[in-house]
Image (spheres, rainbow, N blue to C red):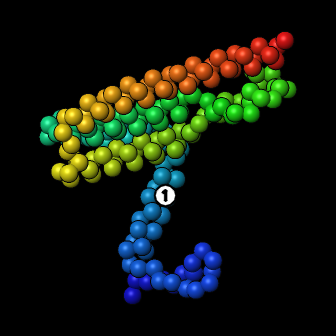
Amino acid sequence: LGSLEVHDEMGDEPGQVGFLELVWASLGKSVRGWVDRTSPYVRTRWIMSSVLFGCLVGRIVLLRKFYAILVFSILYFVNLLVAFLFPLIKSEEYDLPIDEPVEDRTFERRIMEMRFWRSATMCTTICIVSTFWNAADVPLLWEVVGMCSFAIVIRVIISTHMTCASRSKLAKAQVSS
């Protein structure tokens, strides 16, 4: 009861999938189905994610601990936001001459809106669950480390995008001449 015969990757010998694997797969299917059904409702999805993040912030403020979880989740959100807002830059774009005008190229994001939302919501959910686990309440020293890493990440992101912007201007100048 509760097992399913499957074959391994090579297809050589059959194995057994246990009850927990079946439950996990079923849960994953239902979550994917729910996410697929919510895809046309962009505003509703983001409002629900904002409410979920508000619950996380409220829980952390009321408990007066787990501040490091909030800091690291905000770091992750900033990383996702930067990947969402800035375009995908292909390395070969600067090596080869551009045949089409720069204005005609489409804007490709590094991550799509749906993936951005899904990752942000999953991070918030994991953070809320981890606030029920006392081992996740790290001392203040880790918050300082988190804030320093936040500053370093912002510095690296800004310098990377400044470099990409200067390369893009150089590529535009080479195309126009």
- Say above or below: 118 vs 154: below
Residue drawn at point x = 41 percent, y = 35 percent: 77
Q: Residues within 10 Å of mark 1 (few under 14, many from 20)?
A: few
Give the quarter of the figure containing the C terminus: top right
- Say above or below: 127 vs 10: above
Q: Position of residue 109 (x, y in %)?
A: 60, 34
As drawn, is 93 to the left or to the right of 114? right
Question: Which quarter of the figure has residue 148?
Answer: top left
Q: Position of residue 94 (x, y in %)?
A: 74, 27
Residue type at tag 1: Arg
Q: Position of residue 85 (x, y in %)?
A: 54, 28
**Does residue 58 show up?**
no
Question: Which quarter of the figure has residue 120?
Answer: top left
- Say above or below: 92 vs 137: above
Q: Position of residue 79 (x, y in %)?
A: 46, 34
Residue pointed to by mark 1? 32
Question: Which quarter of the figure has residue 52?
Answer: top left
The one nearer the camera, 92 or 85, is 92
Give the quarter of the figure containing the N terminus: bottom left
- Say above or below: 81 vs 36: above
SS for dot 1: helix
The one nearer the camera, 92 or 61, is 92
Residue drawn at point x = 37 percent, y = 29 percent: 150
Residue drawn at point x = 70 percent, y = 33 percent: 91
Residue drawn at point x = 25 percent, y = 33 percent: 143
